[in-house]
Image: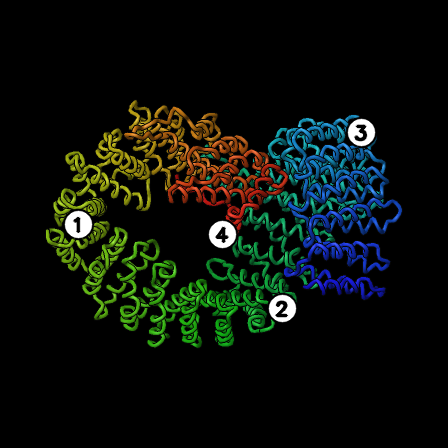
Amino acid sequence: MSSWAVSSVIEKLNARDKDEKYMAMHDLAADLDRDNIKLDGEMERRVVAIILKHLEDTGTDVKQQAVRTIASLARKVQQPQLEEIADKLATHILNKTDEEKRDIGSIGLKTLVGVLTQQTAPAVLKRVTPKLQQGIAMEAEVAHYCLEILNDLLKSFGMIMSRDLASIQSGILPMLSSPVAATRKRVSTCVASLAICAPDQLFVTLIGSIFNNIEASRNADQIRTYIQTIAGISRSVGHRLGRELKRIIPLFMSFCEDDKYKEDTEMLENCLQAFESFVLRCPKEIGPHLDSIIATGIAFIKHDPNYADEEDEDEDLMDEDEPEDEFSDDGDYSGDDDNSWKVRTAAVKCLGAVIRTRPEMLTQLYERVLPVLMARFREREEIVKMEVFSAFKDLLRQSQGSADVVDAMDEDPPSLGRSSASVLRMLDVDRVVKVVLKQLKDKSFKTKEKCLELLRELIAVLNGGLGAYLNALIPDMERAIDKAAKTSLKVEALTCLCALLEKHPGADFTQHVTKLGPAVIASVSDCNYKISAVALRVCGRLTLCTLNGKPLLAASNPFVLNMYTAVFSRLSSQDQDLEVKEAAIVTTGQIVSTLGDVLGPENLNSCLPVMLERLRNETTRVTSLKALSTIARSELKIDVSSISSDAVLECSSFLRKNDRGLKQAALTTLTDLVASYSGSISAPLYQSVARELAALVTDAELHLTHLVLQLCVCMVRCAPQATTPLVQQFVLPRSLLLLQSPLLQGPARASLRSLFATLAASAVPGCGFQQLLDELLGVVKAAPAPLSRQSLSSIAQCISSLCGAVPPEQRTQTLQGFIAQLSDPGAPEQAKLLLLHAVGEIGKGFDLSGFALEKVLMAALLEGSEDTKAAASLALGSLAMGATRQFLPYILQQVAAQTEIRYLLLQALRQLITLKTAEEGKGSSEGGDRMGGELPRVLELLMGQCGAEDEGVRSMVAECLGRLGLICPAEVLPRLQELVKQEHALTRATAVYALKFTITDKAPMAELAGCIADFLALIRDGEIVVRKAALTALNSSAHNKPPLIRPVLSSDWLLPALYGETAYKKELVRTVNLGPFQHKVDDGAELRKLALACMDTLLDKSADKLDTSLFLQHLQARLSDELDDIKQAAYQLLSKLAVREPFCVREVLDLVSEPLQAVLSKRPKESASPQDIERHNELQRSAIQTVVVLHKMPESSTCLKFQAMYDGILQDAKLKALVDSVSTDADGTAPPMPPP
């Protein structure tokens, strides 16, 4: 925009016509918002002058537009003009006589404050702050405007107002005792904002002054204001107020207990709101006061001085048919001046805050709060009743979390935790349900909705459990889904019914189908899409209910047909919401698969083409695929021949789409269709499918590859003559290529093994055993480079599957050929490696003791390359799996005799033990037999090697002992307990390290519970190597079996010892002379890494056992560690803690900002190597990730040092780029902890 154009607009602004001036002002604002406009100094002054002039225009519209233009103008003008605007607006606010000018000045200054930046704000503050301070001492009308603007300035720029904070505080504090209520309210808000940016000393003075005024005041209005102010400060900067709670809470309690204020509704409400704020914002310091807060909340939840309620709490359990008196629950009593409901609301919210934030107090909350909440269901004020329901719902959710923890511990002995039954006993399900059922009869639909929400939470907590109450519940559900009911109530009732059907057996609903059925069917046709969608899901759930192994609705032909008609009408309709379409497709699939025999051919013939049409629709094709899979898997063998060919063709076309979820669903559906209807699929269709499958066999998408191979297996099994040549032509070459990939593993590899076995068993000419074997052996030759051990193992497993699918004679002949090649000195090494792996894999399932393989394997162990030795070692252990009594004694004999290859022989023993632990079943009664009767010899051998000097041997021995503990814990664990008491440090370390391999998913919890403390006690051992092993065992225990260590975590030694290992210890740092150089070696670094890893695991698995403040205290020290990798581990742990416990971390946010700032401000030396620069950049990126997470915590901006650091980061181009990158990549979530 040119200067001439701006001049033209200015001329129009001088016109007399109001409309012309308004339009000109509007155009100017639009032009100023454009990025390409730039005003010179003279033009800036002219534009500012004309806009300020029109702030006093006689036309209201022109003035309002001028105020709106200020925001656009402030972004374009220089500092002098900005100061002029601010000064003019502030002058308007101070106008005592013209209220309209004050309004214009206030709106304009608020607009200006909203667009100021940290760079432009200081100049404006310098001009505005003195005038605002002047204004707050003037008449109330002026002071109110000034306080509002001052509050905005303190919230946005309090950090750069440090010079004025003391004078502002001294100016506004006396106003808390103003006789004008509106003034006191604005001052209270302003003080809360001031507390955010006040330095520590000023903050202490502020709180002390307010506290002294409360104690000295005798005016109730003033006391209420001071209480409100304290609560506001708590909401703003609870972490700073926490240390004052020991003075504040007793004083507030005294007000609640003082008879003088027992009818002062506002006083009581303010105190309870303050308590709620303290609970939420001061989680650490509020702990000692929770009992008294709960007691106060319980007392005032019944506060209703105008309504005499002397009924017993058990009144809620009266018979449902008993008539209620006129003052029962109907809310008939009302008083226009009765505000006691505000006290009750505040009391409920206060209790709700305790419930949400204190899961560790669940037992106490059940005992003290639960009965009170149930009694208050009869609350006469609906607003209060809704809060009661919300608090009760929160309590149920905490119960669900507790039940989840307890369920995970049910496998363990009682000493490891409470049983889930104790939670249910405390919950008193019978009473809860009866109270809720009574409330379902209330006149208010909101009450009914809340009751249904509570029932859903109860179902989730109990995982059902309401079968005994269905007779009482169903009539109310029926009324709630009646067509006359409100929409939201209908949706909630149907959702609750769906949860009931999901969690209860069909037998419970036998007598209720006829009652509920018509209402549910009517809801399917409802014009509201939410009601229709949920009703369709209810129909699906009804369809899946069973009685004596048969569908519950199988004998209800008329109802089934009516339900199908309603669902089909939704399925076939085009103009409806996507949610309804998808629900109709899913429900139709469930009805057809379960009740297809009841529907009859006519209905099926009308339904299946519509399903095919939905399959061809882009928005519903994934849902249709799942529904077709459901139908195909039906035991009724539904006749889908009318659409099967078209469906297969559509599915094959989906395999070309660039949609991973669609391809997964299509592959699953094709597998189900082939499994059930292979005879109706033509050869050309099979060929079309096979062509599409080839491109999906790749190591880039192993899950898709797994699904493709499963489909191929199904095709070969169901239609071998038609599909085997196709699989051999299209899929097999890609599969052989896949075998070269070191990424092949898991389900994909298992499916590939199954494919080779299925192909070998199909006996189709041209795809026999020998041909497949030659192709597998040829993978090694065809590979452009030597294959990895993982690839060789994958090929060997496929060979093993092939051999398992053929007669013994053919397998024997093949093995003899393998042995001959292994004995040939001229055979290529890769070929030998493959054969060693193959022999081992075959030996896992078959007894190969008759092939004299010992000599071949020993020769490989003694004379082969390192890869050959490793392969031979694993093969020997695998052979022992299939013939334990023959090979295990040989291995033990060689371990004792062959010292130079002892490690390899122990590796063979480990392979055998590992394979044994993978077998189904465990226990001491069969452990010895599973080891071929050699368990005593094995234990003696391993015990004797625990103190070996070779670390590799000790690690192998520890793993063998640990895994043996899974097979025969009663024999192994006592022996390990003996070892931890040995004098030799290496022996103790090996024994406790072995525990890492015992504590897995199959850990013998009963045996471990009695001895875990003995092992973990070694965390206090005097030797570093022992403490490392103990920390490793602790981490494994905390990760795999948290209930196992929960009792030990409650001890007075484990956590202090763990935290002690995080400390930097100078005595563990030694200097090593490297000729002309000296190098410092920190032997404690590994201990610190392991300790941080343990802390991370405990935070994930047993956070309720940790004192967050103590945890943070030890974590803080590691933010300044000597080693960068330990710093990074500490950053990541701090990020995780900030997400879980933001209020606790916020208390130390200013402290942790200092080490973060030190890392971010550090620059690498000019002589630094590229590796050093890369490490430095990685450390800074990790620090930035942590800063981003910390900044996203609630009210992090109230921590001044941290906010100053963050603002400084945004001013640094390099660091700001890192912030943008981290925010985009990780969305500010805590990064995963790296392994130690």
Quick one: label 1, few (<14), some, or many (20+) residues within 10 Å?
many
Residue identifier under label 4: 1225
| Residue identifier under label 2 | 525
Q: Which residue is pictured at 56% across the width and 68% down the height?
A: 581
Image: 149 above or below 947: below
Q: Earlier in the sequence, mark 2 or mark 1?
A: 2
User: In the structure shown, which secondary structural element does the residue marked by tag 3 occupy?
Assistant: helix
Amino acid under disc 3: Asp
Q: Amino acid at mark 4?
A: Asp
Is disc 1 in contact with disc 3, using a CB cutoff of under 8 Å?
no
Q: Is residue 529 left or right of residue 790?
A: right
- Residue 137, given in percent of the width and then of the height, sits at 83, 37
In the picture, which quadrant includes the C terminus? top left
> How far is the residue under mark 1 from the one under mark 4?
54 Å
Q: Nearer the viewer, residue 1047 or 197?
A: 197
Q: Earlier in the sequence, mark 3 or mark 4?
A: 3
Name the element at disc 1. loop
Amino acid residing under circle 2: Ser
Comes first in the chain, label 3 or label 2: 3
Q: Nearer the viewer, mark 4 or mark 2?
A: 4
Examine the rendering and report whether any part of residue 275 can be seen: no
